[in-house]
Amino acid sequence: MLRAAGQAGLPAPMFVHPASVEDGDKFFSRRAPDARAIADPEGVLFAGLGLRRGTLRQVLGPKVLWRSFVALLKGNFVGRPTGNETQLPGAFLVRGQEIRFAHRARHAGDHPELDAILAAAGAK
């Protein structure tokens, strides 16, 4: 996935996660050893990017449970909690000091469309 980003004309991804440095290192060493990641257990970067903590419905509601079921069918499983599990995710494309694409999840299973990111990057 990380190498594919460069081939698609996207900058290398930078992950921000709500777990500890140790838990993040363990996670990324198994799944994406080339990944660059920042631990933000206090949620400072998340808040600065306008990412909120989810309500019970945003974290465990019907839409999230459906997306979890689809993920399970694809072989993706939920691991043990390691950070703030109520933190809603987001995806941003940043070039220099400009945010060219922003997706702030409405619920835990809300993901951005890859085509929208590629278009913002000028790769599509």
Image (cartoon, rainbow, N blue to C red):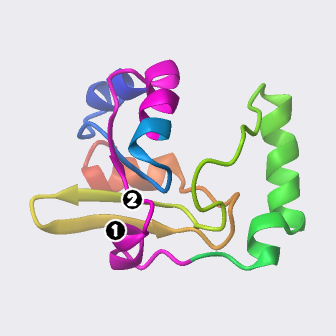
- SS state under label 1: helix
Q: Which residue is mark 1?
A: 45
**Tag 1: residue type?**
Leu
Is the Cβ of the residue at disc 1 closer than 8 Å to that at disc 2? yes
- Range drawn in magenta: 24-52
Label 2: few (<14), some (14–19) or many (≥20) C-alpha neighbours in 10 Å = some
Task: Give the CA distance from mark 1 to mark 2.
Answer: 7 Å
**Tag 2: residue type?**
Asp
Residue 33 included in the magenta stretch of the image: yes
Which quarter of the rendered picture does the C terminus lie within? top left
Q: Earlier in the sequence, mark 1 or mark 2?
A: 2
Query: Could you say which quadrant of the image residue 29 lies in?
Result: top left
Q: Is residue 68 above or below residue 100?
A: above
x, y percent for residue 109 = 70, 57
Q: Is residue 62 above or below residue 16?
A: below
Residue 27 included in the magenta stretch of the image: yes
Which quarter of the rendered picture does the N terminus lie within? top left
Residue visible at 45% across and 60% down in the picture = 41
Q: Is residue 122 left or right of residue 75?
A: left
Q: Which residue is mark 2?
A: 40
- SS state under label 2: loop
The foreground one among 101 and 42 is 42
